[in-house]
Amino acid sequence: MKHEIMIPESAVLLITFNRSDNTREVFRQIKQAKIKKLYVANDGPREGNENDVIEREKIKLLLQEIDWDCELHTLFQEKNLGCGWGPATAITWAFENEDRLVVLEDDCVPALAFFPFCNEMLERYKDDNRIWRISGRSCFPDADFFAGYDYIFTHYAPSWGWATWKRCWDHFDMNMLDITKYLQEGGAENYHFSTSQAAFSNYMLRQALNDKNLTSHIWDIQFAYLHMKNNGLGIVPKKNLIKNIGYIGTHFNKVHKYHLLDVSNEYRVVNHPSFVITNNKYDKYYFKHSIRKLTFIPYWLELFLRKMKIFVKRIK
């Protein structure tokens, strides 16, 4: 008789601020999934901003709608920490009691299939130090890259609905104190397979290094850096499992094509990849059709300087 493997249900962290309408959309899915353990973090109101105070109270009222068996933990900050320290502090707080965590921000509406997918991946790869993040967003669902598998391994695992382990987050450093040494030793050239991808990543890291206000508005570049310096991989599902409704906010001011992706509620994992290795074709395609088209920065200068450096060494 074949016994099914019991997969633990992971706690969910919902990160909120001042968008109660968006939060309600995400909360509706959490409620439907009857999440057993829920952490809700809310960044503090900005000084003198009455709307932030009103939105916070609406979110508090929303949590009173929990009518299922749910262990609720809340963190309502007194002061505003911003888009950098706010989410980072919330994740660190939730990991004080958890060894794994599913993370949703207030504009990432999950398909119901997102939760069992994360649970299965978190359990299956809990002891695999090669895996650092599980993403629910799939920008190119059903593409040929998946080749019969229900998910792939990649260097690009977006943070629009994601999951990770305490073993990973414990190494997180908002200030990236060792980034200068990392760049001096080649940086992303030791991580990516192509020179253009490495040039882009190194350019972004240098921009972050020179950004005096980095921690006030960014946390995900720091987590991406953590992936890179540990040669970490992410997991992306064959079907898209996250609908992003954050069209207007600190980092977006218009709708782009990834906001329009449908989600799959029927998705489940049947076919696992045969090998835990980077899907290089997916990485190249993602870089060319997502990052390079949506990011307007002169990162090619980084590529040019790298090639000049190689040329100078050869002629010496």
Image: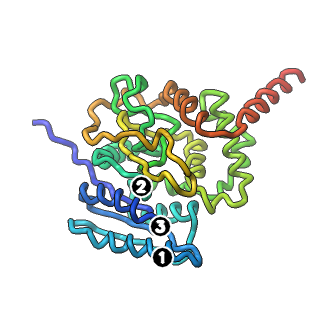
- The mark nearer the N terminus, 1 or 3, is 3
Q: Secondary structure at mark 1?
A: helix
| Residue at image coords 56%, 61% | 83
- Residue that extends furthest to the left in the rendered view of this protein: 1
Residue 300 location (% of width, % of height): 72, 32
Front one among 226 and 196: 196
Residue 268 location (% of width, % of height): 27, 38
Which residue in the protein does label 2 denote?
Answer: 103
> Quarter of the image containing the C terminus?
top right
- Residue that extends furthest to the top in the rendered view of this protein: 315
C-alpha distance separating marks 2 and 3: 18 Å
**Mark 2 neighbour density, 10 Å: few (under 14) some (14–19) many (20 or more):** many
Question: Does 115 appear above or below 258?
Answer: below
The answer to the question of whether label 2 and label 3 lie on touching residues, with beta carbons closer than 8 A, is no
Front one among 288 and 197: 288
Question: Does 107 appear above or below 131?
Answer: below
Inspect the image, locate mark 1, and give the three-letter code of the amino acid beneath it.
Val
- The mark nearer the N terminus, 1 or 2, is 1
Which residue in the protein does label 1 denote?
Answer: 53
Q: Secondary structure at mark 2?
A: strand
Inspect the image, locate mark 2, and give the three-letter code of the amino acid beneath it.
Val
Which residue in the protein does label 3 denote?
Answer: 18
Residue 19 falls left or right of residue 175? left
